[in-house]
């Protein structure tokens, strides 16, 4: 697939690396010469220096031969106009994808499909807000991803933590802990491997678990929390930002009553108070120690930091956790490397906007049937929630009779009747079942041939 990416910022480069790894031919169109050089040094690609709204530069960048054009500059206007020009001038382009942040363009319902030639819109803030709500609804587990359409969660545990012991085999671990779980992958020395029963856990390994059992999560991860998860009643959000706005638009009336927003800018605070009269909006600086005491923020069930400053988000969430807040979520916008730093400070969930954006885009490109998708380890591992379609070639067949590549793992199934299982060889593929699939990114093309 020939892909033209307009904008070589952190999102564009991450998307380019992901698509190049699966064999796509990547070209960047970027105004900044230094970013063009950076793109060529980090991605197997061609970079053209120029504007995405310049027709001659679009031609030079190969738009006439592209199947997909992805506009992810920092300007909504450039992304919209670029996609409009591409749709008008290059009818061979199948997908025109634009990152649009402003609610002024989107409204509450989002833009209708194909407006101005855009076939798919990615709103990073809206995607992030929905990911936060899913996390609140389905369990604020540390470093954990949730599939809302199922009962399954994905989490990672490093060798030496929880019940992950060096030298033990995968089969031995499963036998010793008789819960429903699957080890979908092991991240070892910068590479993802798909284990079998004989694979031994080695020093430095990070194991990826998929389970529908909260008890399995507690035991495997070594978390001390042993109470059944309950959604938080007392929620504090720092920052009256765009992602906060989308989160509040998506929240139910009963959820909004549980939320307080802290914003230091008086104009922004007043705007939010007007937009959301059912929510308490506090005009104050979080660095003012008195706000913590006066509002008893340490007694919060959940503290979410959503400012545009990564460092402030991480430090504030870490401090909130230290003084007694039950759970914390920190937004990471600029540097995905901060995610692990946040977790090391005790933050429960570090939400990377870059990761969320890439997940949304790849999910769209994978096509029908994919209801959710997550990437781990800088995109090296992909995990999907796939709803079996009528076109699926194995409906009515047992898993034991189908020989998949060893790189594909079917980790869980939620059946039409609502039951969730970790499938064995007797499982029969049934229309409408939801499958949790994991695959190494290098083999995602094989998965696409089978399921998508």
Image: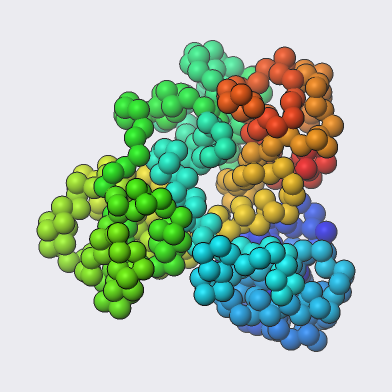
Q: Residue at x 61, y 24 (%)?
A: 417
Q: How is the image coloured?
A: rainbow
User: Is the residue 76 above or below the residue 152 in the image?
Assistant: below
Position of residue 132 in the picture relative to residue 280 (left or right): right
435 with respect to 300 (left or right): right
Residue 10 position, x and y percent, is: 57, 66
Q: Position of residue 217 (x, y in %)?
A: 44, 28
- Indicate the position of residue 445 as horizontal and vertical percent values: 79, 45
In the image, residue 298 sits, relative to residue 206, either above or below, namely below
**In screen coordinates, is 36 left or right of 63?**
left
Residue for point 79% across, 58% down: 24
Give 449 or 89, whichever is nearer the viewer: 89
Residue 52, by quadrant, is: bottom right
Residue sitting at x 59%, y 17%: 171
Tell me where residue 12 appears, x and y as whole percent: 64, 66
Q: Which of 48 and 95 is in front in this view?
A: 95
Closest to the observer, 113 or 266: 113
Residue 53 quadrant: bottom right
């Amino acid at each position: 697939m020939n892909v033209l990416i307009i904008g070589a910022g952190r999102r564009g480069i991450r998307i380019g690396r992901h698509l190049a790894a699966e064999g796509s031919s990547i070209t960047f169109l970027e105004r900044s010469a230094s970013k063009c050089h950076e793109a060529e040094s980090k991605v197997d690609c061609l970079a053209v220096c120029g504007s995405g709204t310049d027709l001659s530069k679009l031609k030079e960048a190969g738009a006439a031969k592209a199947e997909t054009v992805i506009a992810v500059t920092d300007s909504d206007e450039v992304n919209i106009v670029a996609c409009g020009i591409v749709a008008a001038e290059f009818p061979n382009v199948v997908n025109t994808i634009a990152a649009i942040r402003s609610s002024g363009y989107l409204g509450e319902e989002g833009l209708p499909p194909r407006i101005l030639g855009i076939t798919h819109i990615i709103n990073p803030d809206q995607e992030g807000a929905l990911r936060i709500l899913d996390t609140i609804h389905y369990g604020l587990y540390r470093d954990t991803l949730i599939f809302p359409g199922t009962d399954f969660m994905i989490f990672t545990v490093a060798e030496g933590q929880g019940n992950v012991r060096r030298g033990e085999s995968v089969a031995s671990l499963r036998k010793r802990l008789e819960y429903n779980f699957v080890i979908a992958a092991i991240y070892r020395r910068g590479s993802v491997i798909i284990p079998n029963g004989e694979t031994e856990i080695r020093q430095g390994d990070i194991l990826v678990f998929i389970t529908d059992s909260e008890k399995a999560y507690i035991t495997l991860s070594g978390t001390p929390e042993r109470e059944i998860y309950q959604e938080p009643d007392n929620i504090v959000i720092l920052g009256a930002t765009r992602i906060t706005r989308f989160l509040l638009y998506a929240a139910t009336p009963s959820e909004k009553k549980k939320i307080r927003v802290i914003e230091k800018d008086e104009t922004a605070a007043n705007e939010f108070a007007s937009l959301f009269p059912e929510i308490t909006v506090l005009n104050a600086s979080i660095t003012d120690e008195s706000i913590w005491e006066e509002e008893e923020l340490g007694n919060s069930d959940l503290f979410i930091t959503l400012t545009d400053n990564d460092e402030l988000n991480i430090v504030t969430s870490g401090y909130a956790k230290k003084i007694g807040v039950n759970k914390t979520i920190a937004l990471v916008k600029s540097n995905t490397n901060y995610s692990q730093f946040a977790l090391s400070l005790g933050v429960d969930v570090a939400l990377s906007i870059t990761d969320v954006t890439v997940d949304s885009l790849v999910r769209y490109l994978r096509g029908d049937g994919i209801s959710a998708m997550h990437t781990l380890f800088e995109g090296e591992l992909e995990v999907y929630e796939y709803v079996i379609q009528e076109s699926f070639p194995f409906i009515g067949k047992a898993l034991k009779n189908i020989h998949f590549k060893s790189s594909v793992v079917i980790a869980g199934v939620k059946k039409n009747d609502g039951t969730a299982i970790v499938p064995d060889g007797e499982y029969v593929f049934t229309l409408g079942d939801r499958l949790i699939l994991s695959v190494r990114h290098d083999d995602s093309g094989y998965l696409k041939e089978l399921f998508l």
